[in-house]
Amino acid sequence: MAMRLDKFLSHMGYGTRNEVKTLIKNGWVTIDGQTIKKADHQVKEDQIVYVDDTPVSYIQYEYYLLNKPAGYLSAVEDAFYPTVMELIDSQRNDLYPVGRLDLDTEGLLLICNDGHLSHDLLSPKRHVTKKYYVEFAGALPENAVEIFDQPMEFEDFTSKPAKLEILEPQKAYLSISEGKFHQVKRMFAKVGCEVTYLKRVGFGPLKLGDLEAGNSRPLTQEEIDMLKKAVMNKES
Ligand code: URA
């Protein structure tokens, strides 16, 4: 498969489309020993592009696991808040967060450029489990585990059975299989509790582990394979 030269270089972190166009026009880019000055030149898969004599190998997909700190927006860019993309150690311009965590929520956020996989991970049909550590104010009803395990009615959706694991009177894990707006906070509000701290610790087969808030790391090949497996054959 071929790709435009400006797109290729921009994806690989050499700047915006306009910046790489200038780079190309000024004669910094060679392919097979020939200087290429056209931004729309089609790069073939087996060709090696050089920028100022440095070979640029094209990596199609990149996957990062971020421990999102509070105060960062799950978006690619924003006029007011810092975004999660500022915490990813990659210059490429085609990465984005898979789904969203609230501004004040911390924890596991997958960042990648694999549109097919992120679509599948977010699809309501795939029931990918998200596990949250929750601190809350108020007292849970005695039968809270059963209540969360039953469908809860909201204005815009009915929740699927969720698994509540109570750790202490005001600390718990909640595992849900949808990802509706403010879902965990709304589910706790249903039983009269207010979430005071929320952190996602699991997303499908991925675990946050001891990654510090604000840090990110590339996924291992094993994790990528597990993610792909988790969304395979889960249509219903
Ligand atoms: N549920 C919430 O209420 N907030 C989040 O950020 C994620 C799940």
Image (cartoon, rainbow, N blue to C red):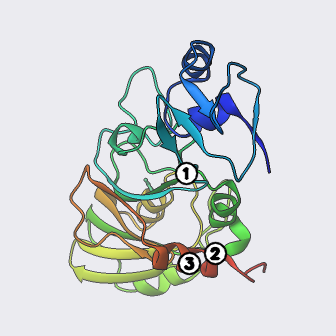
Amino acid type at circle 2 is His
What kind of residue is marked 1? Phe
Q: Residue at x 57, y 12 (%)?
A: 26
In which quadrant of this rendering is ligand 1 seen?
bottom left
Label 3 vs 2, first from the N-terminus: 2
Q: Residues within 10 Å of mark 2 (few under 14, many from 20)?
A: many
Whole-percent x, y for residue 231 in the image: 66, 76
Query: Picture coordinates of residue 36 (x, y %)?
Result: 68, 24
Question: Disc 3 to disc 1, how far (Cα)?
Answer: 28 Å
Within the image, what quadrant is residue 153 found in?
bottom right
User: Are discs 3 and 1 less than 8 Å apart at CB?
Assistant: no
According to the picture, the residue beneath numbered tag 3 turns out to be 225
- The structure residue drawn at horizontal position 31% and vertical position 66%, both measured from the top left corner, is 134
Q: Secondary structure at mark 2?
A: loop
Q: Position of residue 24 (x, y in %)?
A: 61, 20
| Image depth: mark 3 or mark 2 in front | 3
Q: Residue 83 at x, y = what percent? A: 40, 35
Q: Is residue 15 above or below residue 205?
A: above
Is 126 left or right of 165, judged from the image as shown?
right
Task: Give the answer, above or below, for where 72 lies relative to 225.
Answer: above
Vertical side of 167 occupied by 183: above or below: above
Identify residue for label 2: 127
| Residue named by callout 1 | 181
Residue in the image at 68% along x and 74% along y:
126
N-terminal label among 2 and 1: 2
Whether residue 144 can be seen here: no
Q: Mark 2 to mark 1: distance in Å? A: 16 Å
Judge by depth and name the residue closer to the eye, 100 or 230.
230
Task: Please say if the residues under marks 3 and 2 sit with CB atoms less than 8 Å apart.
Answer: no
Is the residue at mark 1 in contact range of ligand 1, meaning its CB lies under 8 Å from it?
Answer: yes
